[in-house]
Image (tube, rainbow, N blue to C red):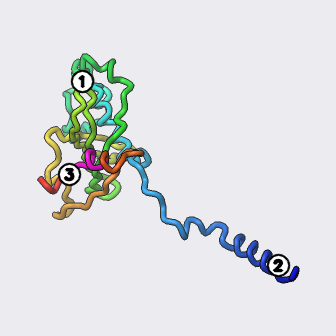
Amino acid sequence: MKKILAFISVTAVVGMLASCGNDKATTEPKPKTCEQIEPCKTALQYTTYVEQGASDKAYEMENKDENLVSYDDEKEAKEHILSDYKKYQGQQIKKYGLLEYEVIPNKKYVYKFRFKDFRNGDVKNFTVGVYKKGSKYLTNNYVNGAVKNDIKHEGSIVPYKRYYSKGLSKADKTTFGPQPVENY
């Protein structure tokens, strides 16, 4: 009886040791959050600056080569910092949903966010383009939202990925889930 128990114990230990290191191969990766994806993180930071009223900080992140800037220069951007900026300066967008369109793989993205306006509490959409230039991500604001042509690559609309901020309930996901750009 002792030999049988010893054999079973040894077999169990050997089996456990043999399976060590196989966790990555047998488990699916957790879905990433926007904050873990560099271009998305850049778009969220830009959106936050615009929402706070920090036009100078948003201007610094914009893609100046494409003439897609909000202002002619940094001086003009500083002149347009909202008067209530100090009130919202430290505020972050906590609850949001977004769609990520990777228009050109690893190079050009369009992000459509949905979140509550800092000033009036209304749920609104905000669309940001992100373009990789060298090792840096630059942004541009789609003032009236993106259109179908903005999310096309080689003539076809690219599929989107949906992300939400952490801890949203099912009802929140309904509230903050933006409609796809291709629906307009």
Q: Dot 2 corresponds to which residue?
A: 5
- Foreground: 163 or 48? 163
- Asked if residue 177 is among those painted magenta in the image, a careful observer would answer yes
User: Is residue 28 among the parts visible in the rendering?
Assistant: yes
The location of residue 96, given as percent across then percent down, is 32, 42
The location of residue 156, given as percent across then percent down, is 18, 64
* Residue drawn at 17 percent across, 47 percent down: 146
Is the residue 21 above or below the residue 56 in the image?
below
Q: Nearer the viewer, mark 3 or mark 2?
A: 2
- Asked if residue 170 is among those painted magenta in the image, a careful observer would answer no
The single residue placed furthest to the right in the displayed view is 2
Question: Looking at the picture, which amino acid does disc 3 mark?
Answer: Gln
Question: Looking at the picture, which amino acid does disc 1 mark?
Answer: Ala
Q: Provide the secondary structure element on which disc 2 rests.
A: helix
Magenta residues span: 173-180
Q: Dot 3 corresponds to which residue?
A: 179
User: Is residue 135 among the parts visible in the rendering?
Assistant: no
Q: Dot 1 corresponds to which residue?
A: 77
Instruction: Report how far apart the C-alphas of labels 1 and 3 lie in the structure.
Output: 31 Å
Q: Earlier in the sequence, mark 2 or mark 1?
A: 2
